[in-house]
Amino acid sequence: MAAHRPPGHPERPERVDAVDAGVADGAAESGAELDRPAVVPADATTLERIHPAPYLALLDDAARQGGGWIDADTWIGPESMVAARLAAGATTQAAMAVGAGEASVAFAVVRPPGHHARRERAAGFCLLNNVAIAVDALRAGGLAERIAIVDWDVHHGDGTQAIFEADPDVCYASTHQMPLYPGTGAPTEGGSGAALGTKHNVALAPGSGDQAFVDAWLAQLAPAIEAFAPEAILVSAGYDAHRLDPLAELEVTAAGFRSVAEAIGRLARRLGIGGVALTLEGGYDLGALRESAAATVAGLLSGLAVRDGGKGA
């Protein structure tokens, strides 16, 4: 919905088309069947597990009045809450489909993104926290209790981490460029109270490239997730870490995303998790988006299909 953003804003509808094409490319490469189910907007019950009703009403009122800037980066337009409810609904459907064994990889190709949104604050292009909404939908539906969130967006998912800061049943693992917006995500941010040790952050310097990115996931974050022993894995899949992205300088390539995705697929298989659900976060170069989404889907499917020791399923 073009009305979600003002002209020239990097959060634009073409991003969805690029990632959708990339998902199809990755499925075709892997010989996987591709299904595009109809998306149902998230209902009030689903949304209000994460976002209080007065906050939702505030956003709805802003949209009805024609919208405008919420902060220096985040725009709300007349149709933005329609798009946001669809994004939350699609992410929830993806998570539920994987949790119910109906899909091995389910990618919610959505806009606006979500991982900067807190319970009562929009920020960083995000209005509703899609992945957090899906986490609590999985728990409410009895499909999983302990859940891991993988976040490889170049920006730290401060909203997601804050929502689950004190929740011991949610493991949050992130790589992100530092220094960069929003300025959070230090390695010392490990959760609070009973959740201390369930939040894991690896901050990477500009120009780090594939090796540092992949090493962070394989050597640090994947083992931490495995030790947590989740029953489901959700991915905040941002592609602004790509070397062509105009908003950051992490210099990752599609090969780096493929390597990490394959490792996450292998991890899911070792844990007895039948699949992985993803939701689109950042990434603003259209070619990089398509290439990286394809690499992610192919990598996940490969990892899920390969037993430990490298043999086929």
Image (cartoon, helix red, strand yellow):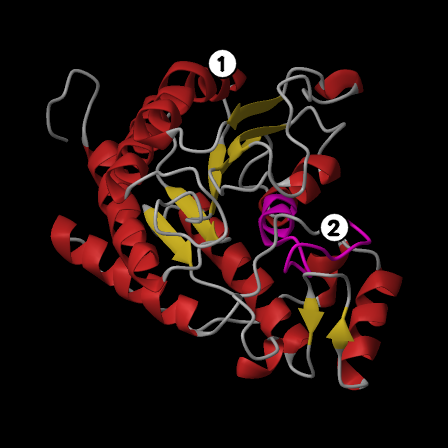
Quadrant containing the C terminus in the rendered view: top left
Q: Residues within 10 Å of mark 1 (few under 14, many from 20)?
A: few
Q: Position of residue 14 (x, y in %)?
A: 40, 73
Which SS does the magenta portion mostly show? loop
Query: Label 2: which residue?
Result: 50
Q: Residue furthest right?
A: 54
Q: Residues within 10 Å of mark 2 (few under 14, many from 20)?
A: many
Magenta-span inclusion, residue 178? no
What amino acid is labelled 2 in the image?
Ile
Pick the front one: 100 or 244: 244
What amino acid is labelled 1 in the image?
Ala
Magenta-span inclusion, residue 131? yes
- What range of the chain is rendered magenta? 119-136
Residue depicted at 44% across the width and 59% down the height: 284
Q: Is residue 21 above or below residue 92?
A: below
> What whole-number distance in Å separates the C-alpha atoms at marks 1 and 2?
26 Å
Residue depicted at 56% across the width and 79% down the height: 7
Task: Name which quarter of the figure residue 289 lies in.
Answer: bottom left
The answer to whether any part of residue 31 appears in the image is no
Q: Is residue 76 above or below residue 157?
A: below
